[in-house]
Amino acid sequence: MSQIQFISVTPQQLQEEINKGVQEVLSTFLENFKPRQPNEYLTRQEVAEMFKVDISTIHNWCKSGKLKPFGLGARVYFLSSDIHNCLIPLND
């Protein structure tokens, strides 16, 4: 087993160095990890892939009022936050 010896390093200096290393790793992680924003718009295909259903199911959910579609020309979009809000918890 190898040992690491700290010579002329105070506990505070060691803690500062550890904090710097953790900060570097966290900043790199946060730069590369971009969660979906609540106001992000999703296409019908993206919503279908999210729920692993066919696009016709998405169309039926819109007709029944389960999903609220937004349109721009011939394109149909859904707010990501609306998708999450339409899910209802099931009682166990």
Image (cartoon, grey):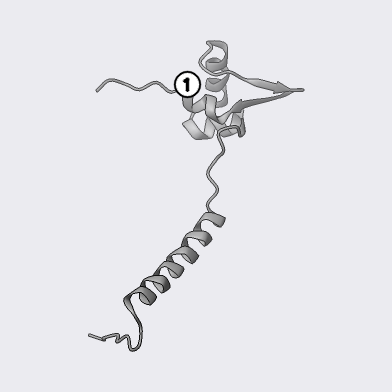
Residue ID at (50%, 58%):
29
Q: Quadrant of the N terminus?
A: bottom left
Indicate whether 6 appears above or below 85. Answer: below
Q: Farthest top residue? A: 64
**Left or right: where 50 falls relative to 39:** left
Could you say which is closer to the camera, residue 55 or residue 31? 31
Residue ID at (46%, 69%):
20
Q: Quadrant of the C terminus?
A: top left
Q: How many marks?
A: 1
Indicate whether 65 appears above or below 55. Answer: above
Residue ID at (32%, 76%):
11
Could you say which is closer to the camera, residue 60 or residue 80? 80
Q: Farthest right residue? A: 73
Residue ID at (44%, 69%):
21
**Residue 4, horizontal then vertical, whole percent:** 30, 85
**Residue 25, horizontal then vertical, whole percent:** 47, 64
**Residue 18, horizontal then vertical, whole percent:** 39, 71
**Left or right: where 88 falls relative to 54:** left
Label 1 environment density (alpha carbons within 10 Å; few <14, some 14–19, many ≥20): few
Q: Farthest bottom residue? A: 7
**Residue 91, horizontal then vertical, whole percent:** 27, 20
Residue receiving disc 1: 86
Indicate whether 27 appears above or below 68. Answer: below
Q: Secondary structure at mark 1?
A: helix
- Hey, what amino acid is under mark 1? Cys
